[in-house]
Every structure is written in structure tokens, then in C-alpha cells.
Amino acid sequence: MPGRSCPLARRYSRKRQKRSLNDYDFELDRVLSWLRDEGAKRVLIEAPEGLKQKIVAEVLPALSSYTVFMSSKPFHGACEVGDEEAGSLGVDHVIHFGHLQMVARRFPALYVPAYYDFDPSPSFAELDILLAKGGRNIAVAASVQYLRALKPISEHLSEKGFNVMVENGKRTKAPAQILGCDYFALTSLAGKADQFLIVTAGDFHALGAVFALNRELLQLDPYSLSWKKLDPTALRSWVIGESYAWTKLEDAAKVGVIVGTEPGQRFLWEAEQAAAELRRSGKHVDIISASNLDPAQLSALPYDVLILAACPRLPYDDADSFSKPVVSVFSVLFGRPLGLRGWLNGNDLTVKSKQSSGIVEQGFSVKRVEKYSTVRDPVVQAHGSPLPYRFKRLSKC
């Protein structure tokens, strides 16, 4: 809702132990208290690659009274879990660093976001200049580790007379949080906000936000403390790559539909629907399950084109890592590029999800797609109309 000023101050200003700035908060007091209260004995640690060195140096020594296993798996997001690994090791508890929980677990699990604490105030002078010519309603968001920075940023904006706008995501736990596959915290404010501001490192979340919004936004890099302006022209490589893949898909004889087995990436319904649609167009289609979405391994499969029913970002961010064309299953079902955009903003396609015993079953309703696919979109206008739902009409695109 606009003008909520500001739940971030309450959420991210909790009293915590003194630590230096420019560091990650592993919340060791909370971790140790939880393990003690749970009566844990054997513990599995899950974390993304970028945190593992610091966890080995700072966290593992504090857990010396427990039998601890550090998973080598790179946990790219909360959609990835290590329940099978935990079961094989006989652990009784799991600690997951770097994300907030998104899917159900088979083991008691504590999620520690590892907030990165830094002072954004040196960037405020540059921010004021960048915002000066825009409207007064500012939507703010961040990826999970940088959420605490939104409190001082929002306070500064309020002091300057801006109306700070905050919303929740569809699959997120915290206000103003964005994921690589969920930008509803921003897109839900698209009709109300004049300007958009995010705090995140690198291009992954930033490009996804631009794509979901299809509008210009400002990104603060928490390490360099510099602001960057991004607009839809930054997605040129995405559009060109998808257009090439669609050309190859039209002529392909053999198509492999890859369905991910990670609980948060298991789009089985979509995989089966896409396979049926492609078969009706006369193509040979097989469905392949994949627990490891390694581009080299998948590219070695004997198919002309791969349809990915897994992480929705993989066909775009990692397209260059595949030696053959890859297409998102959402684009096959709902037209390009709007199918993916509908998924990322969590609003324009109806999502049905069911969580039980660590399993997520997700499916889309097609009823609202016709309305969505008629939106005037500059990316579509530059590279052709979105595909209709029926794949057999692909040649008319």
C-alpha cells in the first residue's frame, strides 16, 4: 500500500549484537539458542557459494559442540533445499544461510538471511540528484541480504518529502523483498509509484526487476555505494537470444522438456502441458527430469531444442552457457516475452501452488492470458508480437 511509512523501520531495526559495518550478520546468538532449544545433535549447513568462506571462518567454530556437515551444494536460492542430502547424512536439523524460507522442509530448519550491514548515506547526494526530476512517490525494494539498508534510505527519502511505498511479494517472507523469480513487491505498485529504487548487488535481481516492471529503475550497489540507472534497453540480449531460440524451435524435430526436481523449481504441470502442445504440432517430445541443471550436461542430450521447466531465469541469464537453443516453458505456454513477465511479477498469471511435505506443485490458469498478451509492450513491438497460446500458430508470429 502506498504511503506506509514505514514497516521497514520496525522490521529491520531489531536490537542485535554490536558488529562492524560492511559485514554479514550470521545471528550466532539466535542460531545457538535455536539449536539448544531444539536439542539438536547433527546439523547440516546450507549456504550460497559467496558466503561459505565466511561461514567456515565465523560460524563453524561456534558450532563445535555439534556434529556439523557443511554442504558443498551451491544454494542459489530458497527454492533449493538439501533434504535428500540431510537424510543421507542422518542429520536432525538444518541451518540455511543467505535466504528466507520459501518451501516446506522435511527437517526442522532455521533460515538465517545473513543481512549485510552497511551505511548507505554516502550515496544519498547522488540519489537526490537522480530523483530530482521525477515524481514524489518512490517504490523501494531489495534482495534479502540488503533489506536493512532500506530503513535509512526510506528515512532519508521521507525527510526530502518523498512518499515511500512498500509492498509484499507473492512468494517472499519480508516486506519489500524481491527474488529473482518474484518482483510483485515492485510491480504491484506500478500504477502508483513514479520512480523505483532497489538495493541489490550485481545484475541478476536488477535485470529481472527491469523486465518485470518494463520501466526504468535505480539500483544501489551495496559494495561500491554507487547508483545505476537501468531501463528495458538493458534486456536487448535477452530478447535477441529468445528470438533466436524460437526460430530454432519452429524447425526443431526433437524437443526435450527439462523439468527441475528442486521443490521450488518443479514445474511439472507446465512441463506436461508444453509437451502436449508441442506434440500436437507434430514434434517428437520427451520429458526429462533434472536435479542438476548444468548447461553442459543438458546440452549433451540428443535434442534440437530444450524447453526448461525449472528456474524461470535460466533460459535468459545462462543462455550463453548452453550449446543449443533453450526456451522457457512459460513462454511456450503463454507467449513471449509476456509469459515470463507474468510469472516474475506474480500477478498477471494465476498461480496455483500447494506445499506439503517439502513438495511444491505449481500450475497456471490460462484464463487471464488473453488479456495480458494484448498489452502494448515496447520490447514486443521491437521484436514481434507475443506468441498465441496455441503453439501450432508459431509460424504466424
Image (cartoon, rainbow, N blue to C red):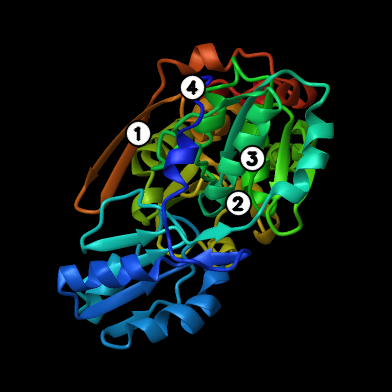
Earlier sequence position, callout 3 versus callout 4: 3
Outermost residue to the left: 39
Which residue is pictured at 83% across the width and 22% down the height?
133
Q: What's the residue type where badge 4 is placed?
A: Asp
Distance Cα–Cα, label 1 vs label 2: 26 Å
Question: Which disc number belongs to residue 348?
Answer: 4
Q: Nearer the viewer, residue 128 or 303?
A: 128
Is 149 on the left or on the right of 261, as rendered? Answer: right
What whole-number distance in Å separates the C-alpha atoms at marks 3 and 4? 30 Å
Secondary structure under badge 3? helix
Q: Sequence-wise, which precedes: disc 1 or disc 2? A: 2
Look at 64% across and 55% down and name the residue there: 318
Q: Nearer the viewer, mark 4 or mark 2?
A: 4
Which amino acid type corresponds to the residue marked 2 in the rendered image?
A: Asp
* Disc 4 to disc 1: CB gap under 8 Å: no
Location of residue 197 in the rendering, given as x and y in whole percent from the top left corner:
67, 35
Q: Which residue is mark 1?
A: 363
Q: Are marks 1 and 2 in contact (CB under 8 Å)?
A: no
Please provide percent x and percent y for residue 289: 39, 57
Give percent across and percent down for residue 324. Answer: 65, 55
